Amino acid sequence: MSSLPAYIITRFLMVIPTVLILLTIVFLILRIIPGDPITAMVGQKVPEEILQKMRHEAGLDKPYHEQYIDYLRGVFTGDLGKSMIWGKRPVIAEIMDHFPATLELTIFGFVLSVLIGVATGSIAAFRRGSKVDSGMRIYSIVAYTLFIPWFGMLLQMLFGVYLKILPIGGRITPGNTPETITGLYVVDSILTLNINSLVDALAHLALPALTLGIVLSGAYTRLLRNNLIDVLSQDFVKAYRARGVRNRKVVFHAMKNAFIPVVTLMGLQFAILLAGAVLTESTFSWPGMGTFLIERIEYRDYTSVQGAIVFYAVFVALISLLVDVIYALLDPRIRY
Amino acid sequence: MLLEIEKLTTVFRTRRGVVRAVDNVTMSINKGEFVSIVGESGCGKSTLAHSVMRLIDPPGEISGGKITFDGVDLLSLSDEEMRKIRGSKIGMVFQNPMTSLDPLEKVGDQISETIMEHMDVTKKEAWQMAREMLEKVGLQPERVDSYPHQLSGGQRQRVMIAMAISLNPKLLIADEPTTALDVIVQEKIMDFLEDMKREGRAVMLITHDFALAAERSDRIAVMYAGWLVEMGDAETLTNDPLHPYTKGLIQSVPDVWMDKDIKPLPGFPPDLINPPEGCRFRPRCSNASEMCMKEPPEVEVDGRVVKCWLYG
């Protein structure tokens, strides 16, 4: 394990080309699609010379390769630039306004998906071949193929419109916002002992997190079921039992073994989760990165979109690195 | 008598039909005795061993008979009572040491977990015992910190044996313990099993290797298609086999000095879902007669049990 730090550094360096490629693609696509931030913001009825002047101020009249180099220089010195519309706020500040909302939704969605997936998957594996097993297998396929906006609306109808027990959109009731410490409302409410905000934040989180959780749980159900069935039939499980190890402990060891591929999936799912969050956010008017990104794409806010993509890329890379470290801690056969 | 198996029947209810993997088997093992169960693949010898441990998983099931171990009727015990016997009173070593250890746990953790399931000791004491057990089976005590993938097949099998004997069981069941190992390692493992016997433990060796059984055991039980066809003293049984199947089995053992010809047994073991009528060995037997259309009785001949009409 002595080379683990070296491995982490190498893995981190690999993020650089990844981000560079992503950034280039996004940079090009933004400029290929018709429209630019200036016309998107002020409309086409503004006299041409004013538009030109505004373009010049934003540096948009320069050739693409110059814009590209300018932007890259900024990114590698840690400056994501300023938004091209309205307030012209620094992009990093804009991201920080929206990222905690997404992170909060993502964490809750992720935890729910793993809990649901592990529960359904292990029940199916332990009752292999039964009706319960068939039910869980059908669940996994249905959950996996659900379309987030459709399923989200279904939940909104049920819990928000008919039962009227949960809010159908937004992050919190206006006026209930807890004092900002981390930007995660649930955490901030707990830190400031604000029960009212906590309940309100959780109620708002319930439906979007459940939507994400259920849709993403299907893959875990299937993977864990198949793996657990495989592990349970292995010799070492029988050997444990032959040594008189309690069933509960045997199950623990089997689960630990079956979890290795699940951890890999967790890393992969986290990236999908962020993408899924975009759809979930727009369904539930969740003021997160997804909503932000869609809005800024419409305004052709080049710097904000590029900044958000860089941010996502680094974040996903960090998560997958974390997953690899957990993987190594779980499985002694992994060496770097 | 340490282990008494009476009319034991273990079946597997498959979609194609019921497989009587162990059919009406009666045998016993004395204290400190080395007994081998010999037979071809699929003859039921492993199922017999697993039945003694009550490790038959569905769709398998022990459908009849009685197993008495050290005066206790094993089949009437609760699951928890049976768990306490496994590992502590009866130890078991499996066929494939490469897959019989948990790949994620250190050797020391696996041995000490077994010890702590049966004895009221601290983790530290259990680890100390694990070190001693490894030393006993000829491994360095520092191996407690190794993971299974860091050990060779022979070393892993020693670890399995260390675990099986760590609680000083009265009976050690070894299910083809050397099949997956090379010949040199095989010798060492077998020597070790003999040491176990010398220490007063009974050993039940499951093997398809007749020569190995003949060399090491006090008594040999020969199984064919779920039946116990012959059981007796190892030397007499080897020199003067009674059952035609035992004869065939001995003639098919290759000899390094080539002073005899190998005579392989013709044919294949029967399909246990639709076994042949009467004697199950009848289709392959050169002595088969009209009589063999009925199931042969188990008869005792000079202290040996034979299930064949030739002696009925």
Image (cartoon, coloured by chain):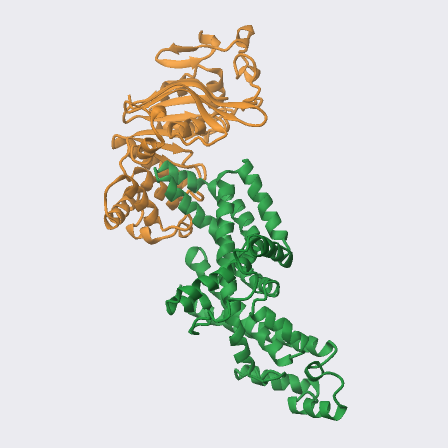
Q: Is residue A136 above or below residue B226?
A: below
- Which chain is the one coloured orange? B
The colour chain A appears in is green
Residue A108 x %, y %: 49, 60
Say whether residue B144 is left or right of residue A128: left
Residue A217 x %, y %: 54, 53
> For the point 63% across and 83% down, which residue is it?
A85
Say whether residue B27 is left or right of residue B199: right
Q: Is residue B162 above or below residue A13?
A: above
Q: Is residue B311 above or below residue A75?
A: above
Residue B174 x %, y %: 38, 33
Q: Is residue A317 visible?
A: no
Quadrant including the N terminus of chain A: bottom left
Image quadrant assignment for residue A188 = bottom left
> For the point 50% across and 55% down, which residue is it?
A112
Residue B61 x %, y %: 46, 26
Q: Closer to the camera, B238 or A284?
A: A284
Q: Is residue B47 visible?
A: yes
> For the point 52% across and 24% down, which residue is it?
B19
Q: How many marks?
A: 0
Image quadrant assignment for residue B133 = top left
Q: Closer to the camera, A295 or B309?
A: A295
